[in-house]
Image (tube, grey):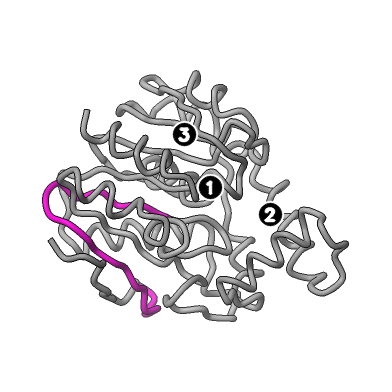
């Protein structure tokens, strides 16, 4: 097995070039990163990709539109409702995946659920860094990030907004691409979530309050189960327990 992921790209239906990384061989698992982040920051850098690949999986981690090395268009027309879910479904078609697992962290977890609602059929699903309020009402968090992006350089040192801006700088995020992306987020309904019937791991840091209680989301899902790991919304994804919990779930 290669020691580091290999980089690939394809054209989304609207022509935007989207990048993804692969590591390992075996059953495919597609994992999506969070807002302001990228595949390297959420999945590769802290060893989660290697942990999961080492358990016999082909790990596929894209850079979402407006993030990482994928296209970052500034035109609002490039961000219709559910564009990230549409991109994910296009990648599944491009790779010819028919028997696979799917998951994501924070925005990536919510996008994974939207993909299932829109027709994706993974054998297993991972929704991490996400709670029920974050699924039902995307506007609250979108507005939080809109304030961050429109007030860059003005946030009080140490505030959640300041910390998010500092994180954005580390990932070299493009505010002019991320702002229109916020308008593409779509609420899910409880009825839609109840139709997610595959085994689903709802995974969150024990101190993560950003998107509401993970347990409420797990309880709503027909085959949901909740797991906690150390950390809050920013730090949980850096812990080895994060990748280990996902690998254990997938390998069970």
Q: Read off the magenta span.
A: 13-32
Helix, strand, or loop for circle 1? loop
Give the mark toward the camera: 3 or 1: 3
- Residue 203 is labelled as 3
| Residue drawn 43% across the image and 41% down it | 242
Give the mark toward the camera: 3 or 2: 3
Q: In this view, does 58 lie to the left or right of 138?
A: left
State the image quarter where residue 142 is shown: bottom right
Dot 2 or dot 1, earlier in sequence: 1
Residue 109: x, y in percent?
A: 46, 45
Q: Nearer the viewer, residue 113 or 151?
A: 151
Distance from label 2 to label 1 (Cα)?
12 Å
- Residue 176 is labelled as none
Give the mark toward the camera: 2 or 1: 1
Residue 137: x, y in percent?
A: 66, 40
Which residue matches tag 2? 142
Distance from label 3 to label 1 (Cα)?
10 Å
Q: In the displayed structure, would residue 151 be above or below residue 46? A: below
Q: In this view, does 30 lie to the left or right of 118?
A: left
Which residue matches tag 1? 106
Give the crowd class for mark 1: few <14, some 14-19, many >=20 residues within 10 Å. Answer: many
Dot 3 or dot 1, earlier in sequence: 1
Q: Quarter holding the N terminus?
A: bottom left
Q: In the displayed structure, would residue 63 be above or below residue 142? A: below
Q: Does the magenta stretch include residue 17?
A: yes
Q: Is residue 194 left or right of residue 124?
A: right
| Residue drawn 38% across the image and 38% down it | 126
Q: In the displayed structure, would residue 218 be above or below residue 166? A: above
């Amino acid at each position: 097995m290669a020691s580091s992921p290999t980089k690939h790209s394809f054209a989304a239906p609207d022509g935007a070039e989207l990048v993804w990384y692969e590591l390992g061989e075996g059953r495919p698992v597609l994992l999506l990163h969070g807002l302001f982040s990228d595949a390297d920051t959420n999945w590769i850098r802290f060893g989660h990709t290697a942990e999961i690949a080492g358990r016999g999986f082909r790990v596929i981690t894209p850079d979402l539109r407006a993030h990482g090395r994928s296209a970052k268009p500034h035109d609002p027309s490039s961000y219709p409702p559910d564009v990230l879910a549409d991109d994910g479904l296009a990648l599944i078609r491009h790779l010819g995946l028919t028997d696979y697992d799917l998951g994501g962290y924070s925005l990536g977890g919510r996008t994974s659920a939207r993909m299932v609602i829109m027709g994706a059929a993974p054998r297993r699903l991972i929704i991490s860094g996400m709670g029920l309020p974050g699924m039902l009402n995307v506007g609250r968090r979108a507005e939080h990030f809109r304030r961050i992006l429109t007030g860059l350089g003005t946030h009080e040192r140490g505030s959640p907004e300041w910390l998010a801006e500092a994180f954005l700088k580390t990932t070299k995020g493009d505010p002019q691409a991320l702002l229109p992306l916020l308008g593409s987020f779509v609420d899910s309904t409880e009825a839609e979530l109840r139709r997610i019937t595959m085994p689903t791991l709802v995974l969150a840091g024990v101190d993560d309050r950003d998107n509401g209680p993970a347990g409420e989301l797990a309880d709503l899902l027909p085959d949901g189960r909740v797991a906690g790991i150390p950390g809050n919304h920013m730090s949980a994804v850096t812990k080895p327990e994060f990748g280990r919990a996902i690998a254990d779930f997938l390998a069970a």
